[in-house]
Image (cartoon, helix red, strand yellow):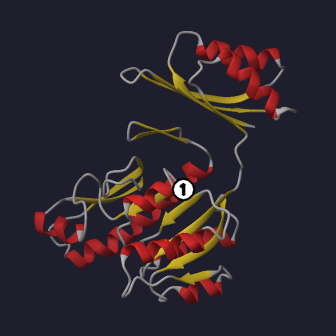
Amino acid sequence: MVILIQCKDSVGLVAAISGLMAQKNINIVSMREHVDTEANQFFVRLVAEQYGSTGELLTDLRAVLPADASIGVNPDPEKKIILLVTKEYHCLSDILVRNHFKTLGASVQCVIGNHDVLQNICERFEVPFHLVSHKNKSKEFFEVGLAEVINQYPHDYLVLAKFMRILSPQFVALFPLRIVNIHHSFLPAFMGASPYKQAYLRGVKLIGATAHFVTNDLDEGPIIEQQIIPVNHTFTAADMIKAGKEVEKSVLAKALKMLFEDRVFVYNNKTVVFE
């Protein structure tokens, strides 16, 4: 059983939670907490042995926690995701392999592409592929098509696995903090298009990738995971792209793992991630 709590900080919260667990004879397996003193926010992820009535436990937790508390008890252990892609295959193929061998921690409901380049690999893994072309369409009409397909499937998250289209604020608002993007740069450096070319021209010695939630501000949503690798003067822009794809796969896989295991809290455009 997993319990997630976020609320204003106050003295005695840990004692109140652990005391309630003891009162109900619920064994705590692990308990991770964090306090942001500047924001006065308290976060806790608690794993405990299964308890009979989650509704009763939720009511009892509300009684001992601040009125503003956000409480989740026993979230769905296997999330459902929809992937959005364009032409690059490296992130998609990594997710499809994990999905096929049941190591993803989620189930891929479908893949939506604005080109048909990746349809074949989806068919090989027996995952539904939907083509929603952006060509000769307004952004509004294109996004209506995306939403129509998305709404055919149950889903917890949309994953932009190298989906090279900028989504409108109106579309993002339909899925608040449920769209995850992998950006081929160590944000906030080199935002926008062609980050590896930007990095090459700047002569950087480190490149990286960032997985983040999508918000209305391009490449500025809450960051879930980041990694970097060293490069040097011998690397061309093409070399950086090749090396960067490996980092992108790793970063996205780690970020999704944290999300699927309910280890990520979001507030003030930041995240608390209990690894």
Residue that sits furthest to the top in the current view: 11
Q: Position of residue 141 (x, y in %)?
A: 43, 77
Q: Give the camera-side residue of 128 and 245.
A: 128
Please state if 73 lies on the left or on the right of 113 as rendered: right
Image coordinates for residue 255, horizontal then vertical, percent: 49, 53
The residue at the point 20 percent across, 72 percent down is 235
Q: Quadrant of residue 45?
A: top right
Residue at horizontal 51 percent and vertical 85 percent from the top: 118
Q: Residue at x 81, y 24 (%)?
A: 26
Q: Quick one: SS at disc 1?
A: helix
**Residue at 51 percent of width and 56 percent of height:** 175
Query: Vertically, is 121 above or below 17?
Result: below
Question: Which residue matches tag 1?
Answer: 256
Can residue 251 be seen here? The reply is no
Residue 40 seen from this side: yes
Q: Quadrant of residue 136?
A: bottom left
Quarter of the picture holding the N terminus: top right
